[in-house]
């Protein structure tokens, strides 16, 4: 998807403040290599930094020939990553923890969106309050953690979960609501589906999952196999640095970033692209004192403990084994591996 560009021999990544202080990343003479990255969903505003990095040639500048792959179904990203069909994947913190609980040798190497985006959602002013959903048909993407979230949210609201019919609608969460196929959904993103439904005057009602009793977590993470982390850390560092620069460029020039997104998703309406990008861009940056892609240790552990208490995980988790901030701009320079 990225046109070949001349590769510079010396790349200076922007200095970034980190929890350990300011550091300067320097990557010299990058070895050109192909990198396959599978997205969590078909191209949308959550991926605007990736497409702006592509547009600006940021990946090529650091010797990466990146191919961005649209998934065919919601379960594909981590499956393709584990099978070796992708080098990196955009996925979700809860999905990654569940896969690791099953024995997957993968971990998160950076956060793309550092707060929950998944929501309970309905249209036409239909009820979305979990306490009033007994007997409802509720759509999900079919991901295991969404079903588990739904059961936990309904149970906490005093609703008999066996009275609710779950419907796997794949990526078609919005269409499932507007067609009347389901009464509500769990898993639609408030910054994407919610914005588009509001623009379409479908009168969405939205309750983000962290308002329904789920602790904060990183909605979107960049995942890699343990083997890739061990052997190709320099590639990951270069990729994250290029993504940082692309995301900053998108924030500085939204019209150009929206054009790059629409090139990747021609069916996306200009109005929808502009509105979702405006809402989404601020979500792609951490707190000012943290480096781009930061994953907060205490938040990861709190969330993992919550999943275990609520039987979403079979075993207790040391969350420090499930993610690393090593490859973020300004972090862990002393232990970078060669590509």
Image (spheres, rainbow, N blue to C red):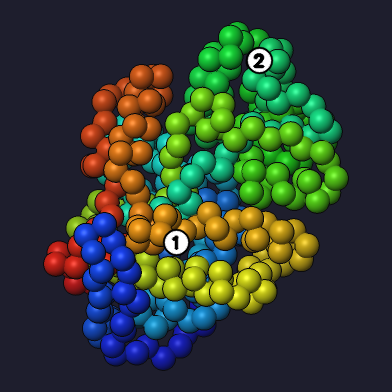
Q: Secondary structure at mark 1?
A: strand
- The residue positioned 44% from the left and 73% from the top of the image is 245
Position in image of residue 159 (x %, y %): 61, 10
Query: Residue 170's image quarter?
Result: top right
Position in image of residue 220 (x %, y %): 47, 49
Residues at marks 2 and 1 touching, judged by CB atoms closer than 8 Å? no
- The residue positioned 29% from the left and 90% from the top of the image is 9
- The residue positioned 51% from the left and 41% from the top of the image is 116
- Of residues 41 and 210, the one nearer the viewer is 210
**In the depicted structure, whether residue 70 falls above or below residue 203:** below
Q: Which residue is mark 1?
A: 37
- Check disc 2: other Cα within 10 Å, few if <14, some if 14-19, many if 20+: some
Q: Is residue 80 visible?
A: no
Position in image of residue 311 (x %, y %): 39, 19
Lower sequence index among marks 2 and 1: 1
Q: Residue furthest left?
A: 334
- Check disc 1: other Cα within 10 Å, few if <14, some if 14-19, many if 20+: many
- Of residues 305 and 262, the one nearer the viewer is 305
Query: Residue 65's image quarter?
Result: bottom left
**In the depicted structure, whether residue 64 falls above or below residue 182:** below
Position in image of residue 125 (x %, y %): 81, 30
Q: Which residue is mark 2?
A: 131
Which part of the image, by quadrant, shows the N terminus?
A: bottom right
Which part of the image, by quadrant, shows the C terminus?
A: bottom left
Query: Residue 161's image quarter?
Result: top right
Q: Secondary structure at mark 2?
A: helix
- Of residues 37 and 129, the one nearer the viewer is 129
- Looking at the image, residue 304 sits to the left or right of residue 209; the answer is left
- Looking at the image, residue 41 sits to the left or right of residue 23; the answer is right
C-alpha separation, residue under disc 2 versus residue under disc 1:
40 Å
- The residue positioned 15% from the left and 64% from the top of the image is 335
């Amino acid at each position: 998807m990225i046109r070949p560009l001349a590769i510079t021999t010396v790349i200076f990544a922007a200095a970034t403040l980190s929890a350990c202080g300011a550091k300067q990343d320097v990557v010299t003479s990058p070895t050109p290599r192909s990198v396959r990255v599978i997205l969590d969903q078909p191209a949308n505003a959550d991926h605007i930094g990736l497409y702006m990095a592509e547009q600006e040639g940021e990946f090529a500048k650091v010797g990466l020939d990146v191919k961005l792959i649209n998934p065919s179904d919601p379960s594909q990203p981590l499956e393709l990553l584990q099978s070796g069909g992708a080098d990196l994947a955009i996925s979700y913190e809860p999905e990654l923890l569940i896969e690791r609980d099953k024995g997957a040798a993968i971990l998160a190497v950076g956060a793309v969106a550092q707060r929950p985006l998944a929501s309970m959602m309905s249209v036409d002013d239909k009820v979305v309050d979990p306490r009033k959903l007994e007997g409802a048909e509720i759509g999900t993407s079919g991901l295991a953690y969404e079903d588990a979230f739904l059961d936990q949210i309904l149970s906490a609201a005093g609703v008999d979960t066996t009275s609710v019919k779950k419907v796997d609608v794949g990526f078609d969460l919005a269409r499932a609501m507007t067609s009347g196929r389901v009464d509500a959904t769990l898993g639609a993103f408030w910054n994407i589906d919610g914005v588009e439904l509001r623009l379409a005057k479908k009168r969405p009602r939205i309750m983000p999952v962290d308002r329904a009793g789920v602790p904060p977590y990183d909605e979107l993470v960049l995942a890699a196999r343990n083997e890739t982390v061990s052997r190709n850390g320099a590639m990951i560092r270069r990729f994250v640095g290029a993504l940082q620069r692309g995301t900053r460029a998108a924030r500085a020039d939204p019209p150009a970033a929206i054009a790059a997104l629409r090139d990747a998703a021609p069916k996306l309406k200009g109005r929808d692209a502009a509105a979702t990008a405006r809402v989404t861009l601020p979500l792609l940056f951490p707190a000012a004192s943290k480096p781009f892609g930061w994953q907060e240790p205490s938040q990861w552990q709190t969330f993992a403990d919550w999943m275990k208490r609520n039987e979403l995980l079979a075993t207790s988790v040391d969350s420090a084994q499930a993610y690393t901030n090593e490859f973020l701009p300004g972090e862990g320079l002393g232990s970078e591996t060669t590509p």
